[in-house]
Image (cartoon, rainbow, N blue to C red):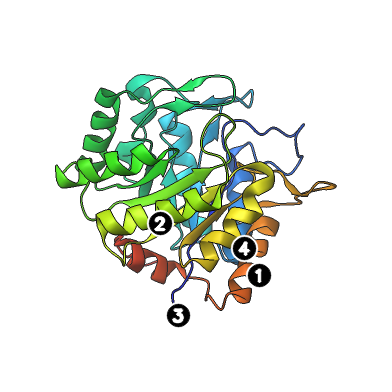
């Protein structure tokens, strides 16, 4: 296969703590250092959350600005994707960082169950987040926790709420949401291609112990892969992951097994239709 694979590293998230794994980067400086190592290992998208001084998730635009500045300085060319996820804030607070004009931002277009709560993404908030992304030239990554989210993304694309073709990420393995199921995974791919075209890029993320499984499915099927300590803090049942870079290297090794070149940041930007930068 000559299709380069984009590797996204989800560096921190909202939930993992140093009690779960001491390698989880919490402060801005730790996140920049961890991302730089992952970038050098082959990751070309950094999916970013920020924490407050007590390590709790926040949507503070100033903290996002500091992280974005650090990543652009130390990881030149890497795609910076900021999270608008619901664990970090409520309502429009979740999109307060979009005027920073990151390359990308996550966009959940529907609600679903999480392990202990409902992940609420009401239609009016989804519409507002999408409009802010359009206004600030931020490409959304559609986080599809359910099949209906792919159809919602198609509806928004046809209505002009999402420009270009959406980049859809299948999120599998969240407790009480979509499990890691190969037939569902294959149907997701079929549905995305049917709705958006055979050559549309897509990505997949596996949560927890199934991260490696979904990485392999995605790479083997010609898609792109997400890894990182946000989704999984272990290499296996007995070993903690020593770094984000170690999880990226595992995905890089899978690319070699499936004859997929690892995308450079220039290739990743071209595949996703992002503006080029000149580090």
Kindly give the residue lying farthest to the right in the view shown: 238
Label 2 CA crowd tier, 10 Å (few <14, some 14–19, many 20+)? many
Query: Is residue 113 depicted above or below 212 in this figure?
Result: above
Q: Please provide percent x and percent y for residue 44.
A: 49, 61
Left/right of residue 33 with respect to residue 87 in the rendered view: right
On the image, numbered disc 4 is attached to which residue?
251
Q: Is residue 180 visible?
A: yes
Label 4 environment density (alpha carbons within 10 Å; few <14, some 14–19, many ≥20): many
Is the C-beta separation of discs 4 and 1 under 8 Å? Answer: yes
Q: Which residue: 63% across, 55% down? A: 213
Secondary structure of the residue carrying numbered label 1: helix
Residue at the image position 33 percent from the left and 35 percent from the top: 109
At 54% from the left and 53% from the top, the residue drawn is 182
Q: Which residue is mark 2?
A: 189
Q: Quadrant of residue 100?
A: top left
Q: Image point 16% across, 46% down: which residue? A: 158
Query: What residue sits right under mark 3 in the picture?
Result: 2
Give the CA separation, mark 1 to mark 2: 23 Å
Q: Earlier in the sequence, mark 3 or mark 4?
A: 3
Which of 172 and 133 lies nearest the eye of the viewer?
172
Q: Position of residue 274 (x, y in %)?
A: 31, 60
- Specify which label sits upstream in the sequence, 2 or 3: 3
Looking at the image, tell me whether mark 3 or mark 1 is earlier in sequence order: 3
């Amino acid at each position: 296969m000559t299709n380069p694979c984009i590797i996204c590293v989800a560096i921190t998230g909202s939930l993992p703590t140093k009690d779960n794994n001491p390698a989880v980067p919490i402060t801005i400086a730790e996140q920049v250092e961890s991302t730089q190592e992952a970038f050098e290992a082959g990751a070309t998208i950094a999916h970013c959350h920020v924490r407050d001084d007590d390590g709790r998730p926040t949507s503070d635009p100033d903290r996002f600005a500091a992280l974005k500045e650090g990543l652009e300085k130390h990881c030149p060319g890497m795609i910076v994707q900021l999270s608008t996820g619901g664990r970090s804030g409520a309502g429009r607070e979740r999109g307060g960082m979009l005027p920073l004009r990151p390359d990308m931002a996550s966009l959940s277009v529907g609600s679903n169950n999480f392990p202990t709560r409902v992940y609420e993404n009401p239609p009016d908030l989804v519409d507002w987040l999408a409009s802010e992304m359009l206004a600030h030239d931020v490409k959304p990554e559609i986080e599809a926790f359910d099949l209906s989210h792919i159809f919602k993304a198609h509806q928004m694309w046809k209505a002009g709420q999402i420009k270009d073709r959406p980049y859809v990420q299948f999120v599998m393995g969240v407790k009480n949401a979509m499990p890691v199921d190969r037939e569902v995974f294959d149907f997701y791919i079929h549905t995305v291609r049917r709705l958006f075209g055979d050559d549309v890029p897509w990505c997949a993320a596996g949560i927890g112990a199934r991260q490696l499984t979904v990485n392999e499915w995605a790479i083997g099927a010609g898609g792109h892969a997400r890894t990182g300590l946000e989704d999984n803090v272990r290499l296996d049942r007995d070993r903690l992951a020593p770094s984000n870079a170690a999880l990226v290297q595992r995905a890089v090794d899978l690319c070699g097994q499936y004859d997929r070149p690892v995308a450079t940041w220039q290739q990743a930007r071209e595949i996703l239709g992002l503006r080029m930068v000149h580090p």
